[in-house]
Image (tube, helix red, strand yellow):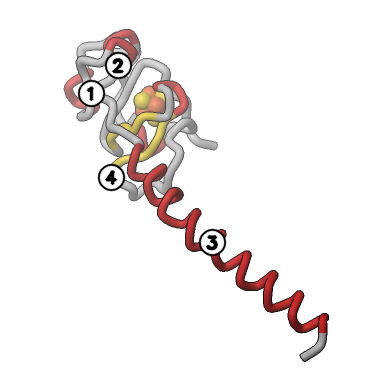
Amino acid sequence: MSDHCDKGRRRFVKLSAIGVAVTPLVGRVSLAAERLEEDDPVAQALFYRHNAADASDHALFQEDRYCYNCVLYDGPEDAEWAPCSAVGNKLVAREGWCSVWVPRS
Ligand code: SF4
């Protein structure tokens, strides 16, 4: 076997080992995202509610405003929960709302 093949094989084995080692860490990071609770001080400061209808008495609330159609909802519109940068990337509810709401373009 040539040196070239041995180097290629060693490189493949090394990269595979790195991939095996890193994959569980990536899974843990995504699982580590925690949901924003309504009694969290940040949630209270922004009047966040898991259910937008529960915020209907707020002066800034308007119908058809939900986390899923806010530009800060960092996930697909049909995701039940997604990170939001306004609340430290904690997960907010798709049907939620807060006073920072900004429309998706
Ligand atoms: S900023 Fe947008 S996505 Fe984040 S909690 Fe408020 S309404 Fe929901």
Mark 2 beta carbon near ligand 1 (under 8 Å): no
Residue at the disc numbered 3:
19
Q: CA distance from mark 4 to mark 2?
A: 18 Å
Q: Which residue is mark 2?
A: 43
N-term mark: 1 or 4? 1
**Measured Cα–Cα span from mark 3 to mark 2:** 37 Å
Query: Label 2 near label 1: C-beta < 8 Å?
Result: yes
Residue closest to the eye, 25 or 73: 25
Question: Residue at position x 39%, y 22% from top?
Answer: 87
Q: Return the residue at label 1.
A: 37
Marks 1 and 2, how far apart at CA? 7 Å
Residue 8, percent from left and from top = 74, 76
Q: Position of residue 57 (x, y in %)?
A: 20, 12
Q: Earlier in the sequence, mark 1 or mark 3?
A: 3
Q: Residue at x 29, y 10 (%)?
A: 41
Nearest to N terminus: mark 4 or mark 2: 2
Query: How many other residues sit within 10 Å of disc 3, few (<14), some (14-19) or many (≥20)?
Result: few
Query: Mark 3 or mark 2, which has the lower sequence index?
Result: 3
Quarter the C terminus occupies:
top right
Amino acid type assigned to the residue bearing label 1 in the image: Glu
**The N terminus sits in image quarter:** bottom right
Residue on which the image places disc 4: 80
Q: Amino acid at mark 4?
A: Glu
Q: Secondary structure at mark 2?
A: helix
Tags 3 and 2 in contact by the CB under 8 Å rule?
Answer: no
Amino acid under disc 2:
Ala
Is the CB of the residue bearing disc 3 within 8 angstroms of ligand 1? no
